[in-house]
Image: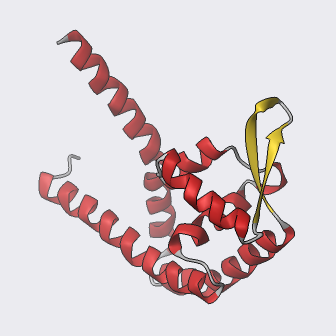
Amino acid sequence: MSLSDQTLSSLTAALTLSSRVYRAAADKVAADYGLSQATGLPVLVISRFGESGVRPGVLAETLSLEPSSLVRVVDQLLESGLLERHEDPNDRRAKILRLTGEGRKTADLMDQALRPFRRKLFGAFAPSDVEACLRVLAGLPDVVANLTLEQAAERKSA
């Protein structure tokens, strides 16, 4: 079965709109904890890496930010006492970002505040539909990466 161009266009528009709407709702939760979207989302994302922390480059990629934009966010989180920067024990040239105790507490509170919203949001759909959506969305980064490589190879050979 092949999907029509109209369906694919509608899907990409829905992805963009859904992301914007969800982020706006999450912004309201972040604001309750004195954070903006720029700082709230990174706190939640860093918390998902656990005690091992995350390298700034990985965080920037995960957040779809340019490294230069991430520097400002990291500086704000460091100044607010939610984040610490450590040397990577495997590579002293590299840095690791870890949440402080206060940062973990903030991430936990934000996540708890988002849970009822997520339950209501996704509770409006059949669990099988949510699971199918998750499978598609989880696979998109790999498909995009492969398409990007294919396009680069085609440009080189042209």
- Left or right, 157 with reference to 15: left
Residue 54 in percent (x, y) is at: 71, 48
Picture quadrant of residue 87: top right
User: Looking at the picture, does residue 156 appear above or below residue 100?
Assistant: above
Count the marks: how many? 0
- Left or right, 8 with reference to 38: left
Residue 89 in percent (x, y) is at: 86, 35
> Residue drawn 56% across and 58% down?
72
- Quarter of the image where the C terminus is located: top left
Front residue of 99/132: it is: 99
Q: Is residue 8 visible?
A: yes
The colour scheme used to paint the residues is secondary structure
For this orientation, the residue located farthest to the top is: 157
Picture quadrant of residue 6: bottom left
> Residue drawn 69% across and 43% down?
55
Residue 21 in percent (x, y) is at: 38, 78
> Residue drawn 64% across and 60% down?
75
Residue 99 in percent (x, y) is at: 78, 62
- Left or right, 127 with reference to 97: left
Q: Is residue 123 visible?
A: no
- Left or right, 81 with reference to 32: right
> Residue drawn 74% across and 41% down?
95
